[in-house]
Every structure is written in C-alpha cells, then in structure tokens.
Image (spheres, helix red, strand yellow):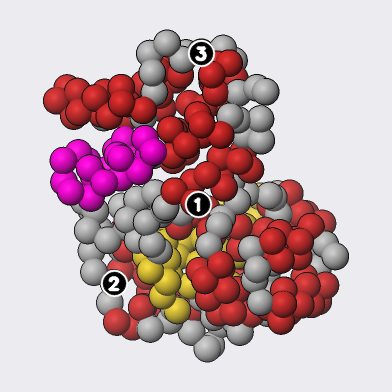
Amino acid sequence: MSEIAKMLKEQEIDSGLIADVEMFRSRYQVEESEKSRVAAPFIPFYGKEILEQAIAGLLQGENLLLSGSKATGKNVLAENLAWIFGRPAYNISFHVNTDSSSLIGTDTFVDNEVKLRRGPVYQCAQYGGFGILDEINMAKNDAVSVLHATLDYRRLIDVPGYGRITLHPAARFIATMNYGYAGTRELNEALVSRFLVIDMPAVDEETLLKIFKATFPDGKGSAMAQFAGLFLDLQLKAFNGEITTRPLDLRGLLAAMKTIRSGLKPVLAVKMGITNKTFDIFEKEIIGDVVMTRIPDDWTAASVFGE
C-alpha cells in the first residue's frame, strides 16, 4: 500500500475511492520536467466528508470550487488533492492584472523567432496538471472568458495564432474563493455551472490538534491544546465581528510555533505570527487579551516542546 493510500485509510476514506485514486496515479504518469511540481503539502488536510466529495468529483473529471471564509483550509485542500492524485500543481492567483495572456501565454522572441511563452493554464492542459485558481471571484471578464471552454465538456483552449489544444485527460482545475472580500464580485452562473461546489466548514478543535500533532510530533499535549484554543477564540471573535480576519492566520500560528523551537518565548512568537498581523492598535489590544488567557508570559520553549 502506498503512502497516499495509507494516509487516506487513516482518515477512513471509502476503500473504493482509494482504489480508484491508486488506479488514476498508475494510469497517468508525470512528465520528467514537471515532477518537481508534485510535492507533499505544507500541512495535511483533515476532513473525511470533504475529502470524499472532492476525490469523487475529481475522479469523474469534474472541476471543484472551494468556497469559504479565511482559514477554512481551501488552499491546503487543493494542494493535498494534487498530491493525492500525484499531479503537478500550477498555482494561478487572480488579481486586477490577470488577463487571458497571463493564463494562456504571450509571444516572446527566442532564437530570432517568435514563440509562445506558455502560461500556467496552457501548461496545466499540456501536462495533465491540477490548476489551482486562487480567488477566482477576483477574475476579470477577459480572464474568465478563457476558462469557459477549458472548464466545460469541450476541454479545449484556443490559442490565438497557435491553434487550439485539448486538455490532457488528467487535467483538473480547483478554484478557491472567499465570499464578500474587498475586490471580489459575484461569479456568473455560466462559470459556477462548470464546477462542483464544496462549502468549506470552519476548522474545529479536533482538526487543529491533528494538524499540530502531524506538524509538531514532539509538542506537549497541554500546550497544543492552548494554541488550538487561541485560534478558536480568535475565530469566534472574527465571526462575531469583534476583530478582522487578519489575525486569523493558521499558517502564521504554525510559523510562530516553529520559532519557539529556536528558543523564542511563546508570547513573542505569537506576537509575530498572530498579533502583529493587524495594524490597528485597538484590535491589537483585543488580540493581546486573548493571547494572555491562553499563552502564559512565563512559558518557555520547554513548556511547548519536549518530553
């Protein structure tokens, strides 16, 4: 049994889905030039139902839209799915300057002739990768128009001046979106219809502790519980509108916990990873009060890690 299959079995994923994933991985080999894009994710994703929904959809050739608020693990899930299926990942962040040429490619001059410098969507189509479309609800119409034929049953990309290409049978697209953020907008029905939509739930204590255990196997249980409680306290305050979502940063919390291993005091580490993510003095005071209830000032690295 492969490492991927063992990981899925530990989460009690349906055995039929695991077998189909293994078959998918063996059927579609990765080009040598793209193997560096197949990498284990930063942190594992935990969630049996969400994983089963996502895996089932991808196995049937569908694309996914992951919708949810900040810190629900949308990008983590996308990275984990690319790794589970053994496909090269191409990250595409949508912003005001993302247009069709940045997705497909642009003309460039090489060896005294004009050639196409391939964009991430083109490469994903060519090599059978998983394209992660980050913040798709920030995409301009020009960029969205490229995706329509790519994402539906046609699975084609028209490249002006270079003809058209057909998507590799292993190519999939996973889009993420934070609903209601500044700069975002409603997705039109035509685009949404090209995805299966998964609504990402808020992270809970059990999931946080699993992530901490996988990331910090030498962490002390009591300390890990306090860090999980800190994140959940901030999540509740953000949900109630008492603070913004800036400090609600799981990556920041994990990074702070890593610096504790170097001997940094936990309160100072949390200040870097969480508290200082906001620049509003009143919000910092609120976060500081929450931190004070969870992370004692006299804690040292030995309070968090070790026997």
**Cα distance in 3D space between marks 1 and 2:** 30 Å
Name the residue that disc number 2 marks.
187
Residue 298 shows up from this direction: yes
Chain part drawn in magenta: 229-248
Marks 2 and 3, the one that precedes in the sequence: 2
Residue 79 shows up from this direction: no
- Image quarter where the C terminus lies is top right
The residue nearer to you, when weighing 176 against 271, is 271
245 falls in the magenta region: yes
Marks 1 and 3, the one that precedes in the sequence: 1
The residue nearer to you, when weighing 228 against 243, is 228
Q: Secondary structure at mark 2?
A: loop
Q: Is disc 3 surrounded by few (<14), some (14 to 19) or many (20+) residues within 10 Å? A: some
In the rendering, which numbered label is found on residue 300?
Answer: 3
Mark in front: 1 vs 2:
1
Q: Amino acid at mark 1?
A: Thr
